[in-house]
Image: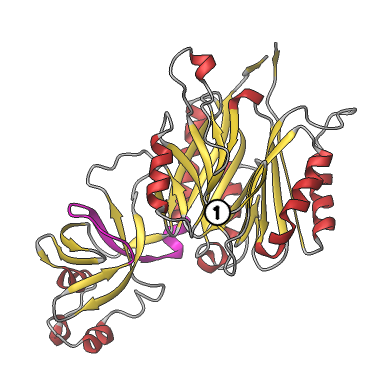
Amino acid sequence: MTLSTRTFRHGHAAQGDWHELTQRVITQLSARESPGDSALVAGLGLLYITEGLSDRLPSIAAKLGERFPGVRWVGAAAHGVCVGGAEYAQEPALVAMICELPADSWRLFSGSQRLAAIDSARSGGAPRTSSALVHADSASAALPESIAGLAHRLDSGFLFGGLVGGAESRGPQLAGGVVHGGLSGVAFGAQVRLLSRVTQGCAPLSREHIVSTCTSHYIERLDERPALDVLLDDLEVGGAARDSRDGEEILRALPAERLSRGLMIGFAPPDVARGVGFGDYVVRNVLGIDPQNRVIAVSTVPRQGDRTVFCTRDQHAARADLVRVCTELRDELESGELNALGAHYVSCVARGEHLFGAPGVELGIVAHNLGEIPLVGFFANGEIAYDRIYGYTGVLTLFVEERNATRI
């Protein structure tokens, strides 16, 4: 038994052919090996590639497998990838991280390889699986129900991950072998300790409301008032436009500067309590208005009793909230006497340089506030935390261990 910190190592490369990029990443991953250690005995590998390399995912995984035969790889092709203080989207790029975790503390799963219980033998009781990293195909049928069902099967109910694939393709996934469609990822037992937060990319335009009446994708009443009237009050639209039945007149009266980054609406169940941070809203787009019936159309199916707030994308609010979640995680590390071994980050495709103004700013904020820990991740078409699919958010998850932890 020795006192030691487990090793997480990461690498990244962009602009080149797949063979060259893979070799550059292998060189980086090999740099921290001890003399004479030709390959890890066992480990979990996380691999993400931009969609320009989608067709090469099997070859990249095979080449990594040749160099690190004890590592099993999980990952996907995505719209963009991120690592440390950098992000890549338009060019061919790949990021990879090897996580040194106990071999019996995690299992890969996919549509053909079911989610396995991890801790049944260790607990001596009912099989348990604590948490899971999940990659989901956005075209999968009944995806919200599948995510919720998967979370329900976990001991903690905690999922983290996102909807993969790029702008032009659904993209392959990786879970030991190449997977197309459905859900895949890696399940963790209680031995693997995780800390996580969701950070919002939107700012509220006014106060919170309650959905009183709704049908399909339409909100008819908020706080027992016509939904469109509530929206116009929140946006401080007055005069003749306030009560107009002319859609064009209403649209002209909306505050264009406040809504320059779009009009969204956030939803939260009335009894939500997940501990992933304040403002735990699932943000969706406002699609249109019906000025005759004073109804609002939204890109989800609301439920009566949902808490809701109108909002818009906001760079300053997004920056402040990302700093907040990093500060909370840093405080939790200190108070719990924990070390961060590595990090995983999933960010919405509408964030990154589109929201923060330049490539790498978002990841730079994380690095500045949490230090230079190994981090990999991707830009998603929807972000997964617990049993919900978010939008316009980031999901930051840390792999941690107790300081001076003993390793057998």
* Residue 189 appearing in the image: yes
State left or right for residue 184 relative to residue 243: right
Residue in view at x 67 percent, y 41 percent: 176
- The residue closer to the viewer here, 370 or 287, is 287
83 displayed left or right of 114:
right
Which residue is drawn at the image coordinates 51% and 29% (left, top)?
A: 334
Q: Which residue is mark 1?
A: 181
Q: Position of residue 339 (x, y in %)?
A: 59, 29
Magenta segment: 299-319
Q: Is residue 127 left or right of residue 60?
A: left
Q: In x, y percent, where is residue 14?
A: 75, 60
Q: Check the picture and name the quadrant holding the N terminus.
A: top right
Location of residue 108 by image quarter = top right
- Is 123 above or below relative to 74? above
Secondary element under disc 1, as helix, strand or loop, is loop
Q: Does the magenta run of residues contain 313?
A: yes
Q: Give the image quarter of residue 91.
A: bottom right
Q: Residue furthest front?
A: 112
